[in-house]
Image (tube, rainbow, N blue to C red):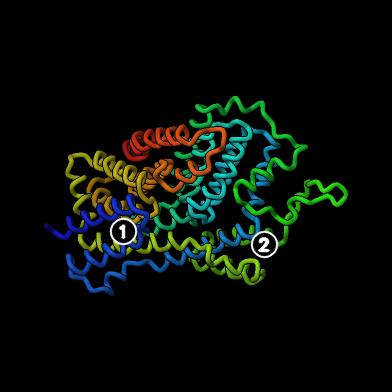
Amino acid sequence: MGPEWVAILALVALFVIGTLLPINMGALAYVAAWLVGMYALDLDEKTILGGVSGDLILTLIGVTYLFAIARNNGTVDLIVRSAVRAVGGRVALIPWVMFFVTALLTAIGAASPAACAIIGPIALGFAGRYRISPLMMGMMVVHGAQAGGFSPISIYGTITNSVMEGAGLPSSEIAVFLASLVVNFILALVLFLALGGRSLVSQRLDPADPDTLSDDLHRGGAAIPQRGYGTSTATGTKTANPGVRHDQVLTLVAFVAVAVIALAFDKNIGFVAITAAVLLNMLAPHQHKDAVKQIAWPTVLLVAGVSTYATVLTTAEAPEFVGTWAAGLGAAAIGALILCYVGGVVSAFASSTALLPVIIPIAVPLIADGGINAALFVAALAVSSTIVDVSPFSTNGALMLANRPDTVEEPVYYKQILTYGVLVTLVGPLLVWAALVLPGW
Protein backbone atom coordinates (compact mmCIF):
# COMPACT_ATOMS: atom_id res chain seq x y z
CA MET A 1 0.00 0.00 0.00
CA GLY A 2 1.42 3.36 -1.07
CA PRO A 3 1.85 6.27 1.34
CA GLU A 4 -1.01 8.18 -0.33
CA TRP A 5 -3.43 5.37 0.58
CA VAL A 6 -2.11 5.24 4.14
CA ALA A 7 -2.64 9.00 4.48
CA ILE A 8 -6.14 8.84 2.98
CA LEU A 9 -7.25 5.91 5.16
CA ALA A 10 -5.87 7.65 8.25
CA LEU A 11 -7.84 10.74 7.26
CA VAL A 12 -11.05 8.70 6.96
CA ALA A 13 -10.38 7.08 10.35
CA LEU A 14 -9.74 10.52 11.83
CA PHE A 15 -13.13 11.83 10.72
CA VAL A 16 -14.97 8.65 11.73
CA ILE A 17 -13.49 8.59 15.24
CA GLY A 18 -13.97 12.34 15.65
CA THR A 19 -17.62 11.99 14.64
CA LEU A 20 -18.46 8.97 16.78
CA LEU A 21 -16.51 9.95 19.89
CA PRO A 22 -16.37 13.30 21.73
CA ILE A 23 -12.66 13.79 21.01
CA ASN A 24 -11.28 17.01 19.55
CA MET A 25 -10.41 16.24 15.94
CA GLY A 26 -7.31 18.39 16.19
CA ALA A 27 -5.87 16.09 18.85
CA LEU A 28 -6.67 13.09 16.66
CA ALA A 29 -5.05 14.84 13.70
CA TYR A 30 -1.83 15.36 15.65
CA VAL A 31 -1.70 11.65 16.45
CA ALA A 32 -2.40 10.74 12.81
CA ALA A 33 0.21 13.23 11.57
CA TRP A 34 2.83 11.79 13.90
CA LEU A 35 2.14 8.13 13.08
CA VAL A 36 1.72 8.55 9.33
CA GLY A 37 4.59 11.04 9.06
CA MET A 38 7.05 8.95 11.09
CA TYR A 39 6.21 5.46 9.91
CA ALA A 40 4.74 5.84 6.40
CA LEU A 41 6.70 8.84 5.11
CA ASP A 42 9.86 8.60 7.23
CA LEU A 43 9.61 12.26 8.25
CA ASP A 44 11.28 13.64 11.35
CA GLU A 45 9.15 15.28 14.04
CA LYS A 46 10.42 18.79 13.29
CA THR A 47 9.28 18.46 9.67
CA ILE A 48 5.87 17.20 10.78
CA LEU A 49 5.40 20.12 13.17
CA GLY A 50 6.52 22.54 10.46
CA GLY A 51 3.09 22.23 8.89
CA VAL A 52 1.43 24.45 11.50
CA SER A 53 0.72 27.98 10.27
CA GLY A 54 1.70 30.44 13.01
CA ASP A 55 -0.12 33.19 11.13
CA LEU A 56 -3.38 31.24 11.13
CA ILE A 57 -3.12 30.27 14.81
CA LEU A 58 -2.41 33.86 15.84
CA THR A 59 -5.43 35.03 13.84
CA LEU A 60 -7.71 32.53 15.56
CA ILE A 61 -6.43 33.56 18.98
CA GLY A 62 -6.59 37.28 18.25
CA VAL A 63 -10.09 37.48 16.80
CA THR A 64 -11.69 35.19 19.38
CA TYR A 65 -9.92 37.07 22.20
CA LEU A 66 -11.35 40.35 20.88
CA PHE A 67 -14.80 38.81 20.50
CA ALA A 68 -14.68 37.49 24.09
CA ILE A 69 -14.12 41.03 25.35
CA ALA A 70 -17.02 42.29 23.22
CA ARG A 71 -19.26 39.66 24.77
CA ASN A 72 -18.08 40.41 28.31
CA ASN A 73 -18.80 44.14 28.18
CA GLY A 74 -22.21 43.75 26.56
CA THR A 75 -21.27 44.98 23.08
CA VAL A 76 -22.78 41.88 21.48
CA ASP A 77 -25.96 42.42 23.48
CA LEU A 78 -25.96 46.07 22.38
CA ILE A 79 -25.78 45.04 18.71
CA VAL A 80 -28.75 42.69 19.13
CA ARG A 81 -30.83 45.27 21.02
CA SER A 82 -30.11 48.00 18.52
CA ALA A 83 -30.97 45.77 15.58
CA VAL A 84 -34.31 44.69 17.08
CA ARG A 85 -35.28 48.25 17.95
CA ALA A 86 -34.26 49.42 14.49
CA VAL A 87 -37.05 47.37 12.88
CA GLY A 88 -39.67 49.14 14.99
CA GLY A 89 -41.00 45.96 16.60
CA ARG A 90 -42.05 44.39 13.28
CA VAL A 91 -42.15 40.67 14.00
CA ALA A 92 -41.69 39.72 10.33
CA LEU A 93 -38.27 41.40 10.39
CA ILE A 94 -37.04 39.69 13.56
CA PRO A 95 -35.82 36.55 11.72
CA TRP A 96 -33.84 38.80 9.38
CA VAL A 97 -32.40 40.69 12.33
CA MET A 98 -31.15 37.38 13.73
CA PHE A 99 -29.76 36.41 10.31
CA PHE A 100 -27.81 39.63 9.79
CA VAL A 101 -26.63 40.02 13.39
CA THR A 102 -25.25 36.47 13.35
CA ALA A 103 -23.64 37.19 9.97
CA LEU A 104 -22.08 40.33 11.41
CA LEU A 105 -20.67 38.45 14.39
CA THR A 106 -18.99 35.78 12.27
CA ALA A 107 -17.83 38.38 9.73
CA ILE A 108 -15.91 40.27 12.43
CA GLY A 109 -14.23 37.17 13.80
CA ALA A 110 -16.62 35.14 15.96
CA ALA A 111 -16.45 31.38 15.50
CA SER A 112 -19.60 30.13 13.81
CA PRO A 113 -20.64 27.93 16.76
CA ALA A 114 -19.98 30.81 19.17
CA ALA A 115 -22.22 33.17 17.19
CA CYS A 116 -24.95 30.52 17.00
CA ALA A 117 -24.63 29.83 20.71
CA ILE A 118 -25.23 33.51 21.48
CA ILE A 119 -27.93 34.39 18.96
CA GLY A 120 -29.66 31.00 18.66
CA PRO A 121 -31.30 31.01 22.13
CA ILE A 122 -32.38 34.63 21.66
CA ALA A 123 -33.89 33.89 18.25
CA LEU A 124 -35.69 30.77 19.44
CA GLY A 125 -36.96 32.70 22.46
CA PHE A 126 -38.62 35.11 20.04
CA ALA A 127 -39.91 32.17 18.00
CA GLY A 128 -41.66 30.70 21.03
CA ARG A 129 -43.08 34.04 22.15
CA TYR A 130 -44.46 35.13 18.77
CA ARG A 131 -45.29 31.73 17.27
CA ILE A 132 -42.65 31.97 14.58
CA SER A 133 -41.61 28.64 13.06
CA PRO A 134 -38.71 27.40 15.23
CA LEU A 135 -37.23 25.62 12.21
CA MET A 136 -37.25 28.83 10.20
CA MET A 137 -35.80 30.90 13.02
CA GLY A 138 -33.11 28.41 14.02
CA MET A 139 -31.96 27.70 10.48
CA MET A 140 -31.84 31.41 9.64
CA VAL A 141 -29.41 31.85 12.51
CA VAL A 142 -27.20 29.05 11.16
CA HIS A 143 -27.37 30.36 7.60
CA GLY A 144 -26.58 33.83 8.94
CA ALA A 145 -23.47 32.49 10.63
CA GLN A 146 -22.37 30.91 7.36
CA ALA A 147 -23.31 34.00 5.32
CA GLY A 148 -20.75 36.12 7.15
CA GLY A 149 -18.39 33.25 7.81
CA PHE A 150 -16.07 33.83 4.85
CA SER A 151 -15.31 37.51 5.23
CA PRO A 152 -11.58 38.23 4.84
CA ILE A 153 -11.22 38.71 8.63
CA SER A 154 -13.39 35.77 9.71
CA ILE A 155 -12.18 32.37 10.90
CA TYR A 156 -13.45 30.46 7.85
CA GLY A 157 -12.21 33.19 5.52
CA THR A 158 -8.78 33.26 7.10
CA ILE A 159 -8.44 29.48 6.91
CA THR A 160 -9.61 29.33 3.29
CA ASN A 161 -7.42 32.20 2.11
CA SER A 162 -4.36 30.85 3.95
CA VAL A 163 -4.81 27.39 2.46
CA MET A 164 -5.26 28.86 -1.04
CA GLU A 165 -2.10 30.92 -0.65
CA GLY A 166 -0.19 27.88 0.59
CA ALA A 167 -1.44 25.83 -2.36
CA GLY A 168 -0.30 28.49 -4.82
CA LEU A 169 -3.84 29.41 -5.88
CA PRO A 170 -4.79 32.99 -6.80
CA SER A 171 -6.41 35.06 -4.06
CA SER A 172 -10.21 35.11 -4.15
CA GLU A 173 -11.23 36.55 -0.78
CA ILE A 174 -14.17 38.55 -2.11
CA ALA A 175 -15.40 35.80 -4.45
CA VAL A 176 -15.59 33.23 -1.66
CA PHE A 177 -17.19 35.70 0.75
CA LEU A 178 -19.86 36.85 -1.72
CA ALA A 179 -20.62 33.29 -2.82
CA SER A 180 -21.31 32.20 0.75
CA LEU A 181 -23.27 35.38 1.51
CA VAL A 182 -25.53 35.08 -1.55
CA VAL A 183 -26.15 31.33 -1.27
CA ASN A 184 -27.04 31.49 2.41
CA PHE A 185 -29.21 34.56 1.90
CA ILE A 186 -31.16 32.74 -0.81
CA LEU A 187 -31.65 29.70 1.44
CA ALA A 188 -32.81 31.97 4.27
CA LEU A 189 -35.27 33.69 1.92
CA VAL A 190 -36.68 30.32 0.79
CA LEU A 191 -37.09 29.29 4.44
CA PHE A 192 -38.80 32.56 5.30
CA LEU A 193 -41.31 32.27 2.46
CA ALA A 194 -41.92 28.54 2.89
CA LEU A 195 -42.38 28.55 6.67
CA GLY A 196 -44.86 31.34 7.23
CA GLY A 197 -42.78 34.49 7.09
CA ARG A 198 -45.40 36.42 5.16
CA SER A 199 -48.03 35.74 7.81
CA LEU A 200 -45.89 37.59 10.37
CA VAL A 201 -46.18 40.94 8.60
CA SER A 202 -49.23 42.01 10.60
CA GLN A 203 -47.63 41.25 14.01
CA ARG A 204 -45.87 43.87 16.13
CA LEU A 205 -43.86 43.85 19.37
CA ASP A 206 -45.55 45.75 22.18
CA PRO A 207 -43.49 48.93 22.62
CA ALA A 208 -45.06 49.43 26.07
CA ASP A 209 -43.51 46.20 27.34
CA PRO A 210 -39.80 46.81 28.03
CA ASP A 211 -39.46 43.34 29.54
CA THR A 212 -40.11 41.64 26.19
CA LEU A 213 -36.61 42.06 24.80
CA SER A 214 -35.01 41.74 28.22
CA ASP A 215 -36.62 38.35 28.85
CA ASP A 216 -35.52 37.00 25.47
CA LEU A 217 -31.98 38.24 25.96
CA HIS A 218 -31.85 36.60 29.40
CA ARG A 219 -32.99 33.39 27.72
CA GLY A 220 -30.00 33.72 25.41
CA GLY A 221 -27.62 34.12 28.31
CA ALA A 222 -26.53 37.58 27.21
CA ALA A 223 -25.47 40.03 29.84
CA ILE A 224 -27.74 43.06 30.17
CA PRO A 225 -25.70 46.26 29.82
CA GLN A 226 -25.64 48.32 33.00
CA ARG A 227 -27.38 51.24 31.33
CA GLY A 228 -29.60 49.29 28.96
CA TYR A 229 -32.49 49.35 31.44
CA GLY A 230 -32.97 51.30 34.63
CA THR A 231 -35.08 50.63 37.69
CA SER A 232 -37.44 53.28 38.98
CA THR A 233 -36.82 53.85 42.70
CA ALA A 234 -40.40 54.98 43.11
CA THR A 235 -42.15 52.03 41.48
CA GLY A 236 -39.47 49.35 41.27
CA THR A 237 -40.35 48.78 37.60
CA LYS A 238 -37.98 48.67 34.65
CA THR A 239 -37.83 51.64 32.34
CA ALA A 240 -36.21 51.92 28.95
CA ASN A 241 -32.83 53.67 29.04
CA PRO A 242 -31.01 52.98 25.80
CA GLY A 243 -27.65 54.34 26.94
CA VAL A 244 -24.36 53.11 25.56
CA ARG A 245 -21.32 52.82 27.82
CA HIS A 246 -17.99 54.25 26.75
CA ASP A 247 -16.31 50.81 26.83
CA GLN A 248 -18.89 49.51 24.35
CA VAL A 249 -18.19 52.45 22.05
CA LEU A 250 -14.47 51.73 22.29
CA THR A 251 -15.10 48.07 21.45
CA LEU A 252 -17.11 49.00 18.37
CA VAL A 253 -14.36 51.40 17.33
CA ALA A 254 -11.83 48.60 17.85
CA PHE A 255 -13.73 46.28 15.51
CA VAL A 256 -13.84 48.95 12.81
CA ALA A 257 -10.17 49.79 13.33
CA VAL A 258 -9.13 46.13 13.06
CA ALA A 259 -11.02 45.74 9.79
CA VAL A 260 -9.61 48.97 8.31
CA ILE A 261 -6.01 48.37 9.37
CA ALA A 262 -6.01 44.73 8.26
CA LEU A 263 -7.71 45.30 4.91
CA ALA A 264 -6.79 48.83 3.85
CA PHE A 265 -3.19 48.73 5.11
CA ASP A 266 -2.59 45.01 4.53
CA LYS A 267 -1.47 44.27 8.09
CA ASN A 268 -1.61 40.85 9.71
CA ILE A 269 -5.13 40.44 11.12
CA GLY A 270 -3.86 38.29 13.99
CA PHE A 271 -1.45 40.94 15.27
CA VAL A 272 -3.98 43.74 14.79
CA ALA A 273 -6.81 41.87 16.55
CA ILE A 274 -4.74 40.76 19.51
CA THR A 275 -3.34 44.28 19.89
CA ALA A 276 -6.87 45.70 20.00
CA ALA A 277 -7.91 43.03 22.51
CA VAL A 278 -4.93 43.75 24.78
CA LEU A 279 -5.61 47.50 24.70
CA LEU A 280 -9.26 46.97 25.63
CA ASN A 281 -8.20 44.56 28.35
CA MET A 282 -5.78 47.11 29.78
CA LEU A 283 -8.57 49.68 30.00
CA ALA A 284 -10.68 47.31 32.12
CA PRO A 285 -8.32 44.63 33.45
CA HIS A 286 -10.62 43.37 36.20
CA GLN A 287 -13.69 43.12 33.98
CA HIS A 288 -11.82 41.14 31.33
CA LYS A 289 -9.40 39.15 33.48
CA ASP A 290 -11.00 35.88 32.30
CA ALA A 291 -11.37 36.89 28.64
CA VAL A 292 -8.27 34.94 27.66
CA LYS A 293 -9.99 31.78 28.93
CA GLN A 294 -12.80 32.42 26.45
CA ILE A 295 -10.47 32.25 23.45
CA ALA A 296 -11.67 29.42 21.21
CA TRP A 297 -8.93 27.05 22.37
CA PRO A 298 -10.72 23.92 21.11
CA THR A 299 -10.91 25.56 17.67
CA VAL A 300 -7.24 26.52 17.88
CA LEU A 301 -6.34 22.89 18.69
CA LEU A 302 -8.64 21.70 15.92
CA VAL A 303 -7.14 23.92 13.24
CA ALA A 304 -3.54 23.42 14.41
CA GLY A 305 -3.88 19.63 14.40
CA VAL A 306 -5.74 19.39 11.11
CA SER A 307 -3.42 21.83 9.32
CA THR A 308 -0.49 19.73 10.56
CA TYR A 309 -2.08 16.60 9.15
CA ALA A 310 -2.94 18.43 5.93
CA THR A 311 0.80 18.99 5.43
CA VAL A 312 1.45 15.28 5.96
CA LEU A 313 -1.35 14.52 3.51
CA THR A 314 0.25 16.81 0.94
CA THR A 315 3.70 15.30 1.50
CA ALA A 316 2.18 11.88 0.79
CA GLU A 317 0.85 13.35 -2.49
CA ALA A 318 -2.68 12.26 -1.55
CA PRO A 319 -4.27 15.46 -2.96
CA GLU A 320 -2.63 14.83 -6.33
CA PHE A 321 -3.79 11.22 -6.19
CA VAL A 322 -7.45 12.10 -5.55
CA GLY A 323 -7.39 15.12 -7.85
CA THR A 324 -5.87 13.12 -10.70
CA TRP A 325 -8.53 10.45 -10.23
CA ALA A 326 -11.30 13.04 -10.31
CA ALA A 327 -9.76 14.72 -13.36
CA GLY A 328 -9.48 11.33 -15.06
CA LEU A 329 -13.23 10.85 -14.99
CA GLY A 330 -13.34 12.48 -18.41
CA ALA A 331 -14.86 15.78 -17.36
CA ALA A 332 -13.31 18.19 -14.88
CA ALA A 333 -16.74 19.52 -13.98
CA ILE A 334 -17.88 16.06 -12.86
CA GLY A 335 -14.79 15.70 -10.69
CA ALA A 336 -15.56 19.09 -9.18
CA LEU A 337 -19.12 17.97 -8.40
CA ILE A 338 -17.82 14.85 -6.66
CA LEU A 339 -15.49 16.93 -4.48
CA CYS A 340 -18.34 19.32 -3.60
CA TYR A 341 -20.41 16.35 -2.43
CA VAL A 342 -17.46 14.91 -0.51
CA GLY A 343 -17.09 18.22 1.31
CA GLY A 344 -20.82 18.48 1.98
CA VAL A 345 -21.40 14.93 3.21
CA VAL A 346 -18.30 14.82 5.42
CA SER A 347 -18.98 18.26 6.90
CA ALA A 348 -22.57 17.33 7.76
CA PHE A 349 -21.15 14.88 10.29
CA ALA A 350 -17.83 16.50 11.13
CA SER A 351 -16.21 19.90 11.55
CA SER A 352 -16.27 22.38 8.67
CA THR A 353 -13.28 24.13 10.22
CA ALA A 354 -11.32 20.88 10.15
CA LEU A 355 -12.41 19.98 6.62
CA LEU A 356 -11.47 23.19 4.79
CA PRO A 357 -7.67 22.79 5.12
CA VAL A 358 -8.01 19.27 3.71
CA ILE A 359 -10.56 19.58 0.90
CA ILE A 360 -9.06 22.66 -0.81
CA PRO A 361 -5.58 21.19 -1.47
CA ILE A 362 -7.26 18.08 -2.90
CA ALA A 363 -8.83 20.31 -5.58
CA VAL A 364 -5.51 21.74 -6.79
CA PRO A 365 -4.76 19.08 -9.46
CA LEU A 366 -8.29 19.36 -10.82
CA ILE A 367 -7.91 23.14 -11.12
CA ALA A 368 -4.55 22.79 -12.85
CA ASP A 369 -5.52 20.01 -15.27
CA GLY A 370 -9.17 20.79 -15.87
CA GLY A 371 -9.04 24.50 -16.58
CA ILE A 372 -11.60 25.29 -13.86
CA ASN A 373 -11.71 28.79 -12.43
CA ALA A 374 -9.81 28.48 -9.14
CA ALA A 375 -11.69 31.19 -7.25
CA LEU A 376 -15.16 29.91 -8.11
CA PHE A 377 -14.25 26.26 -7.57
CA VAL A 378 -12.84 27.00 -4.12
CA ALA A 379 -15.94 29.09 -3.41
CA ALA A 380 -18.12 26.14 -4.42
CA LEU A 381 -16.12 23.79 -2.18
CA ALA A 382 -16.23 26.21 0.74
CA VAL A 383 -19.97 26.83 0.48
CA SER A 384 -20.79 23.14 -0.09
CA SER A 385 -18.77 22.25 3.00
CA THR A 386 -20.49 24.79 5.27
CA ILE A 387 -24.15 25.13 4.27
CA VAL A 388 -24.66 21.61 5.63
CA ASP A 389 -23.94 22.87 9.15
CA VAL A 390 -27.73 22.97 9.55
CA SER A 391 -27.47 19.23 10.22
CA PRO A 392 -28.39 18.22 13.80
CA PHE A 393 -25.11 16.28 13.88
CA SER A 394 -23.10 19.48 13.43
CA THR A 395 -22.36 21.90 16.26
CA ASN A 396 -24.59 24.66 14.88
CA GLY A 397 -27.56 22.41 14.19
CA ALA A 398 -27.18 20.76 17.60
CA LEU A 399 -27.22 24.19 19.26
CA MET A 400 -30.53 25.01 17.60
CA LEU A 401 -31.94 21.67 18.73
CA ALA A 402 -30.73 22.18 22.30
CA ASN A 403 -32.42 25.58 22.54
CA ARG A 404 -35.79 24.60 21.09
CA PRO A 405 -38.72 26.65 22.42
CA ASP A 406 -41.23 24.98 24.72
CA THR A 407 -43.89 25.29 22.00
CA VAL A 408 -42.43 22.34 20.07
CA GLU A 409 -41.53 18.84 21.28
CA GLU A 410 -37.93 17.74 20.90
CA PRO A 411 -38.63 14.65 18.70
CA VAL A 412 -40.67 16.80 16.34
CA TYR A 413 -38.07 19.54 16.17
CA TYR A 414 -35.27 17.01 15.72
CA LYS A 415 -37.10 15.43 12.80
CA GLN A 416 -37.64 18.84 11.22
CA ILE A 417 -33.96 19.79 11.48
CA LEU A 418 -32.85 16.35 10.30
CA THR A 419 -35.16 16.50 7.26
CA TYR A 420 -33.93 19.96 6.34
CA GLY A 421 -30.31 18.93 6.91
CA VAL A 422 -30.67 15.91 4.60
CA LEU A 423 -32.34 18.07 1.95
CA VAL A 424 -29.55 20.66 2.04
CA THR A 425 -26.86 17.95 1.98
CA LEU A 426 -28.43 16.24 -1.05
CA VAL A 427 -29.34 19.31 -3.07
CA GLY A 428 -27.04 22.09 -1.81
CA PRO A 429 -23.71 20.98 -3.35
CA LEU A 430 -25.42 20.28 -6.67
CA LEU A 431 -26.98 23.75 -6.86
CA VAL A 432 -23.78 25.48 -5.75
CA TRP A 433 -21.76 23.53 -8.33
CA ALA A 434 -24.34 24.32 -11.04
CA ALA A 435 -24.16 28.03 -10.24
CA LEU A 436 -20.41 28.46 -9.78
CA VAL A 437 -18.57 25.71 -11.63
CA LEU A 438 -20.74 24.29 -14.42
CA PRO A 439 -21.12 27.53 -16.45
CA GLY A 440 -17.33 27.78 -16.73
CA TRP A 441 -17.26 31.45 -15.76
Residue 226, how many percent across, how many down? Answer: 73, 56
Please say if 121 is above or below 155.
above
Q: Which numbered disc, 2 or 1, marks the residue closer to the eye?
A: 2
48 vs 234, left or right, is left
Residue 240, how many percent across, how many down? Answer: 78, 46
Neighbourhood count class around disc 1 (C-alpha, 10 Å): few under 14, some 14–19, many 20 upward? some
Whether residue 178 is visible here, answered yes or no, is no
Residue 64, how many percent across, how many down? Answer: 52, 61
The residue depicted at 35 percent of the width and 67 percent of the height is: 52
Give amino acid for label 1: Ala
Residue 167 - label: 1
What kind of element bears circle 2?
A: helix
Q: Observer-nearest residue: 214 or 58?
A: 214
* 2 and 1 marks in contact (CB < 8 Å): no
Q: Observer-nearest residue: 18 or 380?
A: 18
**Which comes before the other along the chain, label 2 or label 1?**
1
What kind of element bears circle 1?
A: loop
Residue 398, how many percent across, how many down? Answer: 45, 44
Whether residue 27 is visible here, answered yes or no, is yes
The residue depicted at 30 percent of the width and 52 percent of the height is: 15
Give amino acid for label 2: Leu
Q: Which residue does the numbered mark 2 point to in the structure image?
A: 250
Neighbourhood count class around disc 2 (C-alpha, 10 Å): few under 14, some 14–19, many 20 upward? some
70 vs 45, left or right, is right
Quadrant in which the C terminus appears: top left
Residue 75 - label: none
